[in-house]
Amino acid sequence: MNNVLRVAIVDPNDASRETLKYMLLGMDMIWLEAECSKYEFFSDVVGQTRPDIGVVVLDDNSEKALDMVATLVRRAPECSVLVISNSNDGDLILRSMRAGAVEFLTQPVEIDDIVHALGRISDQKYGQDEASSRGCSTIAVAGATGGVGCTSIAVNLGCTLASDPNHSVVLLDMDLSLGDADVFLDAIPEYTLADVTENISRLDFALLKKSLTKHSTGLYLLPRPVKLQDNDLVNADAMHRVIGLLKATFTHVIFDISKSYTQIDMEALRAANQVLLVTQLDLPCLRNVVRLLMSFSEMEALQEKVHIVVNRAGLGNQITLKKAQETIDRKIYWQLPNDHRVMVEVRNNGIPLVEQAPKAAITQSYRMLAENLSGRGKNPDDHSLASKSKWFGFLAKK
């Protein structure tokens, strides 16, 4: 189940509701949209929040709860109902299904049981093709060292993806101390990552988007805190919740992580579907690529997500592509050409490539990269992608 599913729960019993809530909060595929303590209010809660799944615990008053389920199914047929009860009585299960519930679980609920139940509901509601379209693509942009152009890549890739009307894209600036994604977009954000994490328990989808800064390309930005003192408000647990909400809201989430590889950065790397490890073709960068890949190999499933991206390819006096690949023992996923003049204009004007230089070769490279990351381009494992295109044939020096 690759989708993030929005869930609302109702249970008048505070203790069991808290137990269920924290079980759901620990699952990456779930965003807890709402919780309710009274059966009579739950239909209105669902009508306002429009979750994918309503979880109903019957035990406080099964008759009232089942009446509510039947009403809910009539009023909000798009919301699938999962019922939970202490009882495994066959008659109660049958009545629940007749009321409209699609799944029935018995207390105490085990994590595997609820994961499988939610997976079955997702498959029933959306099917394989639709589920894939609802999934969120999460991309972390990481650097082999400072100054290799990670923020430039994160911003321009985000704006390129956002230029597709079928995409909704958000960029999260995770360099808490010195991040400058807002400068690249000439933006003055009203809210920051510190504000969102501080109020994460009160945020919903509408409030989240109001907390973000929207660029003219369609890209949303959640910038780093303004004050260094606010950095402590952003911890790994809060970041986990923020990422969950962003994944439930957008089709693409881009993380511009810091070069410190803190616990917060590692939370983003774990959440990412793909990691772009940005380097230049010089010895210090390539040495750090080797170090990072060695470290990533000790983290479950992380190294397999890493794509090596060479920035400023074609810059003079560089190590050859062939030698670089031998050094890191890894294929190069993508090469972004060096275009100093255009990139200086982009940076100084605070205007992304798709608006400042839409026909430039480097802009076309970003478009092709976006297509490949979205699975619509050529084979991502072909390290000569850049060299085969009409714009980059001169770059593949071997």
Image (spheres, rainbow, N blue to C red):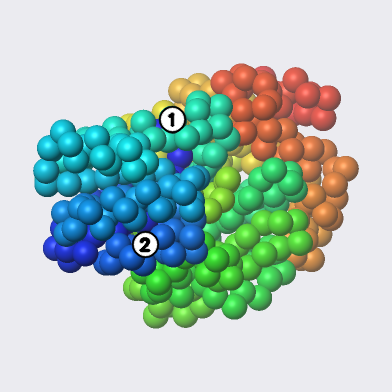
Q: CA distance from mark 2 to mark 1?
A: 25 Å
Residue 278 percent across, percent down from the top left: 55, 42
Residue for badge 2: 42
Instruction: Using the image, determine if residue 46 lies above or below residue 143.
Output: below
Is 86 in front, or is 189?
Answer: 86
Residue 313 percent across, percent down from the top left: 69, 36
Residue 356 percent across, percent down from the top left: 84, 55
- The quarter holding residue 210 reads bottom right
Report the amino acid beneath label 1. Answer: Asp
Residue found at x 55% / y 66% = 206
Instruction: Using the image, determine if residue 335 lies above or below residue 355.
Output: above
Residue found at x 62% / y 19% = 379
- The quarter holding residue 237 reads bottom left
Camera-near label (2 vs 1) is 2
What label does residue 123 carry, if any?
Answer: 1
Q: Quadrant of the C terminus?
A: top right
Q: Is residue 134 left or right of residue 108?
A: right
